[in-house]
Amino acid sequence: MKLSGVMPALITPFDTNGKVDFKAFERHLTALRAAGVTGWVPMGSTGEYSALSNAERDDVLRFVKDFAREGEALIAGTNAPATREVIENTLRAKEIGYDTVLLATPFYTRPTQDELLAHFRTVLDETNINLILYSYPYKDGVEIGFDILDALADDLRVLGIKESSGSLQRAIDIHSRYNGRIDLISGSDDIALDFMFWGADAWICGPANCMAKACVDLDRTFRSGDLKTAREKMIVLYRAMNILESGKFVQKVKYGCELQGLPVGNCRAPLRELTIDEKAEFRAAMQPILNW
């Protein structure tokens, strides 16, 4: 399976009682589809998966699966602290209808590189599902190193790596070393255009929840070969992307959805609402994107 285009790392809407709001979810997904996204990535960190029960996660995965149309990519987040739990989550996702999962390093545990390689291999062997690796060392404390990628590069079930290190040099290394074996997938949103230039055909994008039209337009402009215009559009996006990366990412993305006229509720604790000043800063950066 070759992934391409902008695929939002989906938020999870909540109602005023803190329950998953599926009516708001349907409105949200409908707007994203109209903007031109190419697939769906529920139950990642942007979706607050660690704050949901297994039953809620399954309900979200099932809802997104039922909403998806033929030809739209479906990628489930099934992460957990322990290999056994990842396998259980992945098998449930597979039963629901997902054939690809996105896996970061197990949180809290900080495994060594040898332990991490064994983890991914065990998940693959026990589930026989397609895998997209997710390297986000700033959040997880562990990088998916090149020894791991070397060991997995010829496994046809390992489709790509969502690279969220923020290191362009590492992205270039991944593309040059594994082109045609492991796809580079953009996960560093404020340098997404640079990732496109260095071979990232797909962008798993949390900010697309609140700026899908602009992200899709940037992707299409780059693909058209108009690099000058693509650079100008990235400059407009950069300020908002940079503010997102500065902290309180999920809260800001959800507030951005509200600015787009599609409120999706607050985050679950311990995440708290933005301050007045934080809202004002992000709202100002979003203005040209709202008028895209």
Image (tube, rainbow, N blue to C red):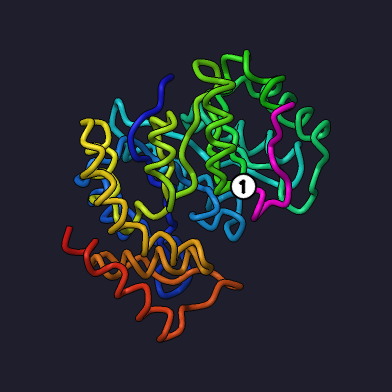
Q: Quadrant of the C terminus?
A: bottom left
Residue 290 shown in magenta: no
Q: Which residue is drawn at 73% across and 24% down?
A: 121
Q: Residue at x 69, y 21 (%)?
A: 150
Q: Relative to the observer, which residue lies in front, 85 or 232?
A: 232
- Tag 1: residue type? Tyr
Residue 159, given in percent of the width and then of the height, sits at 53, 23
Residue bearing the label numbered 1? 136
Taking the image as shown, residue 183 lies to the left or right of residue 194, namely: right
Q: Residue at x 41, y 41 (%)?
A: 194
Residue 118, given in percent of the width and then of the height, sits at 79, 28
Residue 145 shown in magenta: yes
Q: Relative to the observer, which residue lies in front, 198 or 284?
A: 198
Q: What stretch is highlighted in magenta?
A: 137-147
Taking the image as shown, residue 17 lies to the left or right of residue 4, namely: right
Q: Relative to the observer, which residue lies in front, 117 or 79?
A: 117
Residue 239, given in percent of the width and then of the height, sits at 36, 64
Q: Residue at x 55, y 32 (%)?
A: 161
How many C-alpha atoms fall within 10 Å of the one at disc 1: few (<14), some, or many (≥20)? many
